[in-house]
């Protein structure tokens, strides 16, 4: 066995078996809160995490994709649109290692909707928001200060203000951020308070035993088992954990995938259905007189003018690969790549009404189906056109381009609108998603403690638990729901829940 710098985790190098009262599978946003809550309630907890240990940070995007992204960064959905990346994290800290750290509270209308859908899982609304206050405190959430806005953030801010659109600096959980803009590669400066910084070590201090490099492949009442993997993802042995209770916190894709792969739930049943993805589409613009590229927060600015239409805009970090998604070839592409320093980029995120489904996996590749419904297609077209307005009217862009097959760079709003008609085919979109949610929803697939209705002794508590999507970046909602459901579970298992904020 190898241990971490501070010895709060272990990476087994030889086959092992162990027992625990509760085994938690996954150590991301939800897993960390579940492990902490259960361990501090005095219960005997083992955490099993497939991914890497946090001692060595990836040096490049390529290395990060291979080591810290689910399925090496190639996890995709298939359906009416071309294959859509569904990014997810893999490691002690899960997706919080690689997320942009944007933080949003659960909107009140969303919470009301969740109560309708779940039969009142969060009916004590004041208690829900008190937990969320504590989650935000412990995650050290604060607005991005002006001095950390990147050039891209600043041009979006100016453009939105010129148009009179509602906007704000994004709130983030980055207390020591230096503004290097590399959040998606694992923060190299310990600036982001991902859950491996404080929460997992605190869970370990309360007695949780945390194992990295352990991929769960089989689950049944009382037992999880799987293979040990090394940093190169080579299988080096096997493990089994016997436990009275299992909590799956492997994320909205892997949690249903594990259950289907294990054959312990009805293949045609509710587990894995209801998938929301909150797809994002980039709108890029050339601002010849403005230096857009300058360091700062990875995504520091938000436009929420169209939130009632289920659309928000967040500045997007522009990387060469994104420019290469523009409908350009050969010398045209080379010319635009050379303008990279003056290219602004916003990402339009929608609160989707489409619902997909997660099945099991084939050769380690999750099978994810997702079709964009007509209402979402219309919303995406409105998103693209409003994004173009932001840049043309708000920032005087020379051209605006977006991520559709067969498109071109538009020189004015009319050209852009003509390129993005309401009957645009989903097959022309180049979409991206990193917010899968709602595949094992509370009140539909589980009871109000997160326990599976189909399989006694097994709970699902993570982004899969949400009754539907948040319509914002979801990590704070996922953490809040994880804290609430795991507190109920701890109580049920005879534990005494300790306060999240030590008194
Ligand atoms: C690139 C990116 C950017 C994002 N940006 C933001 C943002 O700015 N703000 C925001 O609010 N949200 C953001 N999100 C989303 C947010 O991080 C997630 O919604 C949240 O982390 C989900 O929490 P979770 O616990 O359900 O899953 P995760 O945090 O993904 O954790 C799941 C864990 O389970 C482990 N696991 C999976 N399968 C197995 C297995 N078989 N055996 C053992 N372990 C397993 C995984 O390795 C992973 O560590 C982003 C996500 C990504 C990928
Ligand atoms: S912008 Fe850089 S320093 Fe700030 S949290 Fe992200 S990776 Fe860390």
Image (cartoon, helix red, strand yellow):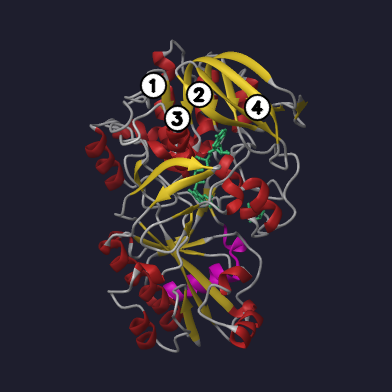
Based on the displayed image, in which of its 4 quarters is residue 423 positioned? bottom left
- Measured Cα–Cα span from mark 2 to mark 1: 10 Å
Q: Relative to residue 342, is residue 423 drawn left or right?
A: left
- Measured Cα–Cα span from mark 1 to mark 3: 9 Å
Q: Earlier in the sequence, mark 3 or mark 4?
A: 4
Q: Is residue 80 visible?
A: yes
Residue that carries the numbered disc 2 in the rendered image = 37
Q: Relative to residue 182, is residue 268 drawn left or right?
A: left
Residue at (38%, 87%) from the top-left corner? 415
- Measured Cα–Cα span from mark 2 to mark 4: 18 Å
Based on the displayed image, in which of its 4 quarters is residue 59 positioned? bottom right
Instruction: Give the magenta range.
Output: 145-161
Residue that carries the numbered disc 4 in the rendered image = 211
Q: Are marks 3 and 2 in contact (CB under 8 Å)?
A: yes
Residue that carries the numbered disc 1 in the rendered image = 488
Q: Earlier in the sequence, mark 2 or mark 1?
A: 2
Between 167 and 370, the one nearer to me in the picture: 370
């Amino acid at each position: 066995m190898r241990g971490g710098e501070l010895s709060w985790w272990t990476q087994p190098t030889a086959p092992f078996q162990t027992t625990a009262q509760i085994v938690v599978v996954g150590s991301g946003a939800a897993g960390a809160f579940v492990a902490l809550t259960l361990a501090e309630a005095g219960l005997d907890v083992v955490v099993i995490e497939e991914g890497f240990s946090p001692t060595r940070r990836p040096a490049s995007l390529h290395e990060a994709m291979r080591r810290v992204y689910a399925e090496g960064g190639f996890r995709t959905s298939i359906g009416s649109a071309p294959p859509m990346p569904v990014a997810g994290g893999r490691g002690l800290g899960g997706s919080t290692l690689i997320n942009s750290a944007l933080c949003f509270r659960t909107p009140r209308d969303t919470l009301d909707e969740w109560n309708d859908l779940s039969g009142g899982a969060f009916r004590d609304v004041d208690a829900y928001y008190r937990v969320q206050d504590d989650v935000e405190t412990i995650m050290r959430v604060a607005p991005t200060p002006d001095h950390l806005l990147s050039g891209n953030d600043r041009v979006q801010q100016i453009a939105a203000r010129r148009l009179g659109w509602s906007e704000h600096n994004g709130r983030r959980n980055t207390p020591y951020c230096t503004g290097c803009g590399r959040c998606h590669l694992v923060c190299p400066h310990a600036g982001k308070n991902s859950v491996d910084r404080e929460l997992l070590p605190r869970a370990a201090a309360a007695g949780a035993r945390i194992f990295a490099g352990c991929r769960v492949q089989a689950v049944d009442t009382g037992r999880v088992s799987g293979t040990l993997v090394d940093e190169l993802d080579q299988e080096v042995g096997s493990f089994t954990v016997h436990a009275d209770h299992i909590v799956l916190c492997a994320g909205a894709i892997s949690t249903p995938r594990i259950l289907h792969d294990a054959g312990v739930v009805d293949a045609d049943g509710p587990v894995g259905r209801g998938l929301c993805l909150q797809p994002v589409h980039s709108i890029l613009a050339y601002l010849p007189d403005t230096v857009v590229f300058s360091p700062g927060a990875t995504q520091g600015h938000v436009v929420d003018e169209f939130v009632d239409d289920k659309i928000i805009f967040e500045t997007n970090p522009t990387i060469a690969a994104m420019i290469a998604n523009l409908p350009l070839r050969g010398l045209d592409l080379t010319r635009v790549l050379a303008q990279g320093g003056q290219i602004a980029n916003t990402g339009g995120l929608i609160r989707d009404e489409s619902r997909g489904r997660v099945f099991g996996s084939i050769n380690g590749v999750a099978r994810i189906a997702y079709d964009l419904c007509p209402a979402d297609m219309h919303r995406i077209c409105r998103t693209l056109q409003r994004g173009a307005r932001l840049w043309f009217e708000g920032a005087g862009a020379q051209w605006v381009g977006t991520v559709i097959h067969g498109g071109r760079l538009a020189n004015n709003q009319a050209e852009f609108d003509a390129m993005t008609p309401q009957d645009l085919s989903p097959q022309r979109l180049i979409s991206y998603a990193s917010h899968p949610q709602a595949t094992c929803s509370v009140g539909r697939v589980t009871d109000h403690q997160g326990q599976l209705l189909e399989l006694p002794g097994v709970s699902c508590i993570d982004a899969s638990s949400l009754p539907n999507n948040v319509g914002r970046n979801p990590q704070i909602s996922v953490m809040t729901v994880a804290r609430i459901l795991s507190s109920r579970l701890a109580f049920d298992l005879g534990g005494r829940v300790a306060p999240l904020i030590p008194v």
